[in-house]
Image (spheres, rainbow, N blue to C red):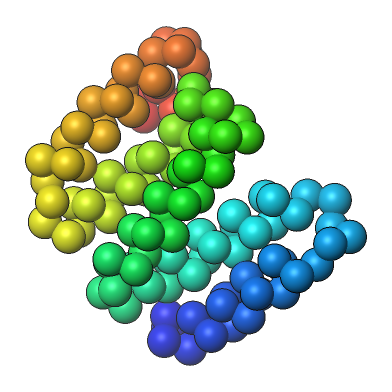
Amino acid sequence: RPEEALPVFEAHLALSRRREEWTHKEEEILDAQDSVADCLCDLGRHDEALVLWREIYARRVDTLGVSHETTIDSQNVNAICLDKMGRHDEALVLRRVIYARHATLGASHEDTIR
């Protein structure tokens, strides 16, 4: 029930952004932001979800690099959201980039096999 979960996840995100003592603050914020975006997407608010997911992807590029599997997963979420919005051409472009980046993980990596 995303309509009930959304305010909880939004509060968690706000708390995550305020807490300075958490050791993994950046990842905590990104995870909370991802939960909010998931709820927004489930509610059909794809434009808002895509904004959050693009921010998550950008932060992961900055902190982990474009070829890190977590970054690649973040970009895949963007492609899925674009598909749900009917923006299939944009999603296809992202999926081609994702496919190329999976090659950097190696042929036997579980994400490449998927």
Which residue ends up furthest to the bottom in the rendered image?
4
Q: Which residue is painted at 78% across and 49% down in the image?
A: 24
Task: State the quadrant of the C terminus.
Answer: top left
114 vs 58: above or below = above
**Which residue is rendered at x = 19% and y = 32% of the image?**
93
* Residue 10 versus residue 46 in the image, above or below: below
Residue 13 in the image: state x and y as whole percent: 62, 70
x, y (%) of residue 34?
51, 59
Residue ID at (85%, 51%): 23
Q: Is residue 44 left or right of residue 6?
A: left
2 on left or right of 22: left
In this rendered view, identify the residue nearer to me: 112 or 43. 43
Residue 19 placement: quadrant: bottom right
Is residue 70 visible to the viewer in this orientation of the structure? no
Q: Position of residue 37 (x, y in %)?
A: 43, 65
The residue depicted at 55 percent of the width and 39 percent of the height is: 60
Q: How many badges with numbers are in the image? A: 0
Q: Position of residue 1 (x, y in %)?
A: 42, 83
Left or right of 76? Residue 93 is: left
Furthest residue to the right? 21
Q: Is residue 97 visible?
A: yes
